[in-house]
Amino acid sequence: MRAAHPATRPGDESGDRTHAAPEGHPAGDAEAGAAPAGTAARPEADGGPWWRDAVCYELYPRSFADGDGDGTGDLRGATARLDHLAGLGVDAVWITPFYPSPLADGGYDISDHTAVAPELGTLDDWDALTARAHALGLRVLVDLVPNHTSAAHPWFREALAAPAGGEARDRYVFRDGRGPGGRTPPNDWLSAFGGPAWTRVPGDGPGTGPAQWYLHLHTPHQPDLNWRNPAVAAEFERILRFWLDHGADGFRVDVAHTLFKAHGLPDAGHGQHTEPHRNHLMPYHDQEELHPLYRRWRTVLDSHPGADGTAAVGDRLLVGEVILFDQRRLARYVRPGEMGHVLNFAWTDAPWEGRALRAVIEETVAATDAVGAPATWTLSSHDTLRPVSRFGGGERGARRARAAALLTLALPGAAYVYQGEELGLPQAHVPEDRRRDPVWELSGYTDQGRDGCRVPLPWQGSTSPYGFSEAPPEDCWFPPPDDWAPLTVDAQHRDPGSVLSLYRAALRLRRAHPPRRTGRLRLLGPGSGEWLGFDRGPGLRCLVNFGPAALPLDPTDEVLLSSEPLHGHLLPPDTTVWLRPGPR
Ligand code: GLC
């Protein structure tokens, strides 16, 4: 692994240093060009709930740790490894679906929302997990999937057996088709995974009308619920309360922008799922009725008694997976009384380029400041290409991913870390015959899908599956690659120059400079495609070099941490540094 980051130790005088900062470079015009990105006052600047500046760790249970040796990660395995998260220094763990599921979409097709998948454990195992997390000082976020159920859910089975127009079908979105014999889908909506968003079911029987179609914005195994049916809303309140009773400190709400569909189900036209910047214009996205719903859920979370019998006003967290790129539309979900966070997909999707990242920072901070909410920053998730691969793969991708991590963790607000990001894992190759993601099939075998970021975590040892399971690699959820021995938690734990050590150091320092206490963000200079810089209050400056040449640093600034070893006062290409600005 690489040399120790403490090449960045304060007071390290070794190496060549260039003191002059050319005009337009970060050390040269920091103050003159400073432009506040967000100016609204934050009344809670010195306090507020824990989640305002939290770091939340996304745990995908099937690939985190296997406790029973069957090759699939499970709740007991996760509980036994939670100390990794505490050691990392995160505040909360978001656990992706662990419910009974036919696994048509990695567990996001749920057949019972208030139970644990038998292969992952029992409700007692869940209670033990939350108890252990709480003992370690970690909050627990449950993944709530309200847009759809599995086709194996009892409600959908009932709907299929019921006549058109009845209550059982009204919990979902059933419609007659268009054209002769109703053979054309009710409208032009497309599934996010490819193909039409409608599937036709057999007719109700002789003389009962044409066979109907049901809506599924994802796979045909995930029928969309009808959120205008009060039984659906009541059921999800029951589900919220159930998990609150079982230790949940909040919820990540799956595709939280799609629950309501525009009245009359009008055609969506072009750009569906291909022009994400127009997402908010689609008739199945961002409908106004979502906001009263989330305000209602906020009151459920605030008023539901906790384990000690007291309510927790404002302490519990709703995180929306709201896939909108218009930051002002997005910020409407985190207005007072609604959600606490929305995941920031503009950040996840941004290229490794100073101007593009600066624009996302400016828009995000301005939009969230305007509603008094924290910004959130997400580099990756179980749905995305891992940053190392997204930024070019190999050593260059790994280097940029480290720099992107330090940039992300320096920004004000909350951050999300997807399991394995803290180990610098690349996207793994999953052999065709082992692929599970429905995207592979639904794309006509053109898109490899998301399996490569869902490969089991390497924990220790020199051979696959690296302590993930007692099972042989071929029996694991996905087979871990053969060359991950240097990436195990154990190997990186012992290496001060590892990605894991970098994350730990960053999270430790972040606690010493909590964004909520150090005031607003000030972007430095005009920036350029080649560099980006900002101050977060008086105590922390972050500079990133995207360009091909080293950038001079101000020698009076104290280096707190950098994503690569520094030699002298030079910031190498594809490197981020955290500085404590010296006296000017
Ligand atoms: C969310 C999940 C994703 C899933 C989809 C449908 O986007 O993150 O994994 O496929 O919802 O439930």
Image (cartoon, grey):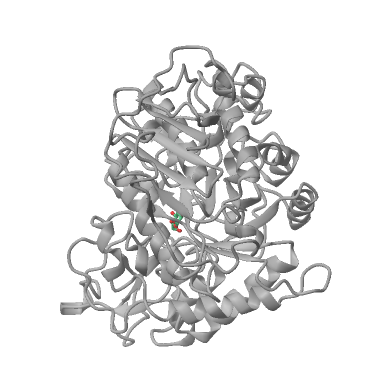
Q: Which residue is drawn at 52% across and 12% down?
A: 14
Q: Number of numbered discs present?
A: 0
Q: Which residue lies furthest to the top in this view?
A: 15
Q: Position of residue 406 (x, y in %)?
A: 49, 37
Q: Quadrant of residue 448?
A: top left
In percent of width and height, residue 374 lies at: 51, 60
As rendered, which of 434 and 498 lies closer to the eye?
Answer: 498
Quadrant for ligand 1 reads: bottom left
Depth order, front residue of 11/275 = 11
Q: Residue furthest right?
A: 308
Q: Where is residue 493 in the image (x, y as percent from the top left)?
A: 66, 24
Residue 109 vertical position relative to residue 280 in the rendered view, above or below: above
Q: Residue furthest front?
A: 584
Residue visible at 26% across and 70% down? 281
Please indicate whether residue 123 sits to the left or right of residue 14 in the image.
Answer: right
Which quadrant is home to the N terminus?
A: top right
Q: Residue 274, how many percent across, how many down?
A: 24, 55
Q: At x 48% / y 12%, what residue is drawn?
A: 15
- Nearer to the camera, 173 or 405: 405
Is residue 216 among the parts visible in the rendering? no
- The answer to whether residue 122 is visible is yes
Q: Quadrant of residue 427?
A: top left
Query: Is 234 rendered above or below residue 424?
Result: below
